[in-house]
Image: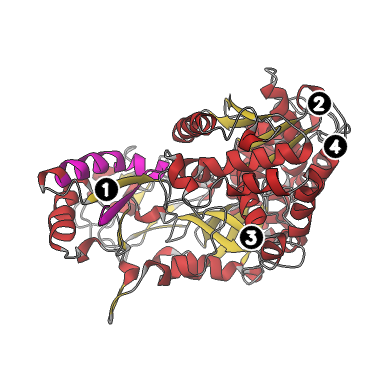
Amino acid sequence: MYRSHVLVCGGTGCTSSGSTKIIDTLQAEIIKNGLKEEVSVVQTGCHGLCAQGPIVIIYPEATFYAMVTNEDVPEIVSEHLLKGRIVNRLLYKEMITEDGIKSLNETDFYKRQHRIALRNCGVINPENIDEYIGTNGYEALGKVLTEFTPDQVIQSILDSGLRGRGGGGFPTGLKWKLAKGNDADQKYVCCNADEGDPGAFMDRSVLEGDPHVVLEAMAIAGYAIGASMGYIYIRAEYPIAVDRLEIAIGQAREYGLLGKNIFGTDFSFDIELRLGAGAFVCGEETALMTSIEGNRGEPRPRPPFPAQKGLFEKPTILNNVETYANIPQIILNGPEWFAAMGTEKSKGTKVFALGGKINNTGLVEIPMGTPLREVINDIGGGIPNGKKFKAAQTGGPSGGCIPAEHFDIPIDYDNLISIGSMMGSGGLIVMDEDNCMVDIAKFFLEFTVDESCGKCTPCRIGTKRLHEILDKITNGQGTMEDLQKLEDLCYYIKENALCGLGQTAPNPVLSTLRYFKDEYLAHVVDRKCPSGVCKALLSYIIEADKCKGCTLCARICPTGAIQGKVKEIHLIDQSKCIKCGACMEKCKFGAISKK
């Protein structure tokens, strides 16, 4: 029996910051200090507070050490683990109060969360099936196989109100019911772990921290619809998640939790991985299935829908990682428990990846209906450097922006759609007053143009024309006619594109036109970028009353655009200036500004 457990984040973020080396050093220092029989080191998944990584948490005290380096490890071992003295300088600062040290669950980042899909992430070793079983893992599967009929399983999911967390929000139980109602000699259960939105890492973190929950849920889904085979489609750029899924599948087979006659019943179910090449379009269900079949990932016309004719032309259900992560807890706690959380039409919780201009970059899980202001200011720690909130982009390139006027909107499926945004899979990119919304729209369009599969003309050509118009506007060459063309083309693409990628591609443009039309007009009419982002519309100016003639700006200018003698006012030759901003960054007197 160990007296202390040292949990080290082994998610992608912390791993990239050196947590693997920290684990090795911890183990070596523990042996060196004679603590091998008393202290265990556990590699976990993501704890959520990515901005503070690498993270080390020591139990039973639940001491949260943030931004740990390999050089900090000997002190942690000698002071905390050997002598029982907390290393205050490494503590997560939000835990330190005038009255002492508060618990991790009392911090603003964690106390407002309700973790269901993330309940095991950062808590268990994802590569040890016994730890998953120790947290009631596979109990839900055993329960449905011995106590539920397939129809009862589906009814429980329907009664819970669970909607698909991949972006569309389609009722999960209804999808399963439709697939069960179609007879076939073979049916399939698929998991979408492709997750291609810029700034999104929710599904990856679940797979890295709790892979067995997805395997268990897929087996439950297989029993419910009458399927014996499942596929997890995951992008190859997620090597840690792929490795842990492979380990989990092997362990589940060894324990008889995948394969033939699970729990001694006549139900058999197995799962295989399929690696994707990172095509965003393969987040669309029919394109994903086409890719699993070994063909180029392109969407198919619907109907027929996958529940009728999906993978290999057999009835198929497809849900994303987060959707599946809720299933076992719904079975164990009952649909009423899940339905009691959230709003009338959006039940349960939602996982978001917070990114952009926010202090607490990371992963959060909140009840549906939580106001955006609470997510950003309280959980997210607000905007850095005292800047003002300008907008938040939800749904990635398929979503839209939420402006400051809707800062208090409760986050759920219907509310976001009503203001021209969407839930999406859960990426939430925060922007402040320094962001140019025309440039943001162009950024997402550039991504969509690159990711279009090219099958249908509205998406293949239409998104490219949209990007060209936006590029023209940000280069100071736009006209009022271009603004009208931009809007007309957006609606044409939405109405005529084949799949969800094309149909939602105009959303960032339409939402920024709706809420930030003044910025578009400034670019077109005044030939100015109010936020000072679009280089073609910028000018760097030396303010005469502040310039000391130190010559530093002239010396660092890469094009020799700045001229002036020592102790004399300098000038910038706009014809030579490439607008790199190096002069303004280095000026010690604040004499250079951009206009």
Tag nearer the camera, 4 or 2: 2
Q: Secondary structure at mark 3?
A: helix
Residue type marked 2: Lys
- The residue tagged 2 is 314
Q: Earlier in the sequence, mark 3 or mark 4?
A: 3
Give me the C-alpha separation between circle 3 and circle 2: 32 Å
Mark 1 and 3 residues: CB-CB less than 8 Å, in contact? no
Give me the C-alpha separation between circle 1 and circle 4: 58 Å
Give me the C-alpha separation between circle 2 and circle 1: 48 Å
Q: 11 or 426, which is in the foreground?
A: 11
Q: Secondary structure at mark 2?
A: loop
Q: Write down the region rendered in magenta.
A: 1-30
Residue type marked 3: Asn
Q: Name the residue rendered at 11%, 47% in the picture.
A: 34
> Is residue 475 among what the camera can see?
no
- The residue tagged 3 is 333
Give me the C-alpha separation between circle 4 and circle 2: 27 Å
Give me the C-alpha separation between circle 1 and circle 3: 31 Å
- The residue tagged 1 is 40
The image shows residue 223 at horizontal and vertical percentages of: 73, 38
